Image (cartoon, helix red, strand yellow):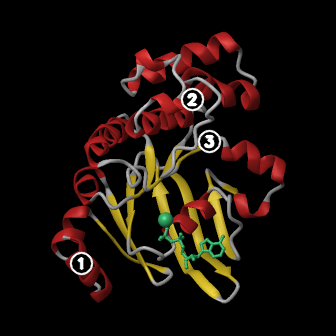
């Protein structure tokens, strides 16, 4: 039996009169890679932020590994949130810390990991993302693609159960997109559960187990990438694909 990692039930998010997420119910199983695609403004970022309750849903449930995140104390929520790594479009590295310090910080501060252990893990992760030689540099001396790989390593340092990516390559110069996608692909191959909001259709086609097409406040289609790209069901999805492909 596959283990459900994240589940949302009748998720709704409203800002003022703007019903951004209307009624979303989906599940993510352990090891699955989900690519969430859809038009700009359709609520993809809001959806990801609701998953780790960075944004409080207006209604509905978010269940992570059996715990209802929408119905627990802030203290419990913070503990569970550590298991959900998040990578943003803008890398959000701490500019006044070296690459190594950026990666070591949360495990030491939040989890109480010893400095020696945090450093060992950080170095392993840096090697994994191909940046072993950048440990003592500061973020601004790195390219965008390198900074994003550090951001991924930093999220992985907390040993998350699931990784959430919000358009991780959208802010990058084109020549740097591939190196970040490669790190993400390796992560997927290693069995990480991933929810990836992306406009990289090649990545979605090759790496996703499921594509979730989001528009007008709903997840309109859930399909394998083959099925979605060759035979989209809804008019909304056909229209979207016509515009981008
Ligand atoms: P996407 O990531 O698909 O482009 P977003 O989730 O960023 O979409 O935004 C969906 C809608 O929600 C937009 O209309 C946006 O203006 C609105 N929205 C997002 N965040 C907020 C917020 N913090 N306050 C008010 N409106 C917001
Ligand atoms: Mg967005």
Q: Say which of marks 3 and 2 sits in front.
A: 2
Q: Earlier in the sequence, mark 1 or mark 2?
A: 2
> Could you tell me how far apart the alpha carbons at marks 3 and 1 are, in whole angstroms?
36 Å
Which residue is identified by label 3?
83
Which residue is identified by label 1?
243
Total labels drawn: 3
Does the numbered disc 1 mark a residue whose Cβ is under 8 Å from ligand 1? no
> Could you tell me how far apart the alpha carbons at marks 1 and 2 are, in whole angstroms?
38 Å
Which residue is identified by label 2?
157
Left or right of 97? Residue 152 is: left
Residue 67's disc number: none
Q: Which residue is drawn at 62% across and 54% down?
A: 64
Residue 46 in the image: state x and y as whole percent. Answer: 57, 68
Q: What element carries label 3?
A: loop
Left or right of 43? Residue 203 is: left
> As rendered, which of 90 and 111 lies closer to the eye?
90
Mark 2, residues whose alpha carbon is within 10 Å: few (<14), some, or many (≥20)? many
Residue 37 in the image: state x and y as whole percent. Answer: 37, 67
Using the image, determine if residue 169 lies above or below residue 245.
above
Q: Do the residues labelled 3 and 1 touch (CB within 8 Å)?
A: no
Q: Do the residues labelled 3 and 2 touch (CB within 8 Å)?
A: no
Using the image, determine if residue 126 lies above or below residue 33.
above
**Residue lying farthest front?**
141
Q: Which residue is drawn at 74% across and 42% down?
A: 79
Q: Earlier in the sequence, mark 3 or mark 1?
A: 3
Q: Which residue is drawn at 30% across and 45% down?
A: 177
Q: Can residue 127 be seen in this view?
A: yes
> As rendered, which of 99 and 209 lies closer to the eye?
99
């Amino acid at each position: 039996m596959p283990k459900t990692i994240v589940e949302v039930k009748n998720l709704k998010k409203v800002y003022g009169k703007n019903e951004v997420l209307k009624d979303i119910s989906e599940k993510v199983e352990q090891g699955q890679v989900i690519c969430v695609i859809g038009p700009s403004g359709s609520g993809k970022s809001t959806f990801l932020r609701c998953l780790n309750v960075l944004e409080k849903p207006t209604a509905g449930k978010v269940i992570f590994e059996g715990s209802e995140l929408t119905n627990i104390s802030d203290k419990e929520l913070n503990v569970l949130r550590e298991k959900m790594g998040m990578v943003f479009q803008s890398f959000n590295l701490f500019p006044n810390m070296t690459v190594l310090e950026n990666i070591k910080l949360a495990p030491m501060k939040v989890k109480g990991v010893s400095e020696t252990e945090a450093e060992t893990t950080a170095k392993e992760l840096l090697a994994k993302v191909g940046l072993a030689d950048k440990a003592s540099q500061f973020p601004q001396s790195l390219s965008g693609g390198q900074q994003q790989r550090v951001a991924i390593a930093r999220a992985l340092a907390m040993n998350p159960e699931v990784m959430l990516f919000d358009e991780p390559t959208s802010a990058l110069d084109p020549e740097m997109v591939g190196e970040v996608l490669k790190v993400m692909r390796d992560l997927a191959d290693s069995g990480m559960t991933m929810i990836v909001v992306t406009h990289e259709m090649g990545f979605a086609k090759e790496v996703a187990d499921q594509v979730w097409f989001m528009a007008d406040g709903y997840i309109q289609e859930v399909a394998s990438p083959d099925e979605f790209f060759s035979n989209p069901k809804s008019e909304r999805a056909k229209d979207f694909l016509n515009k981008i492909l």
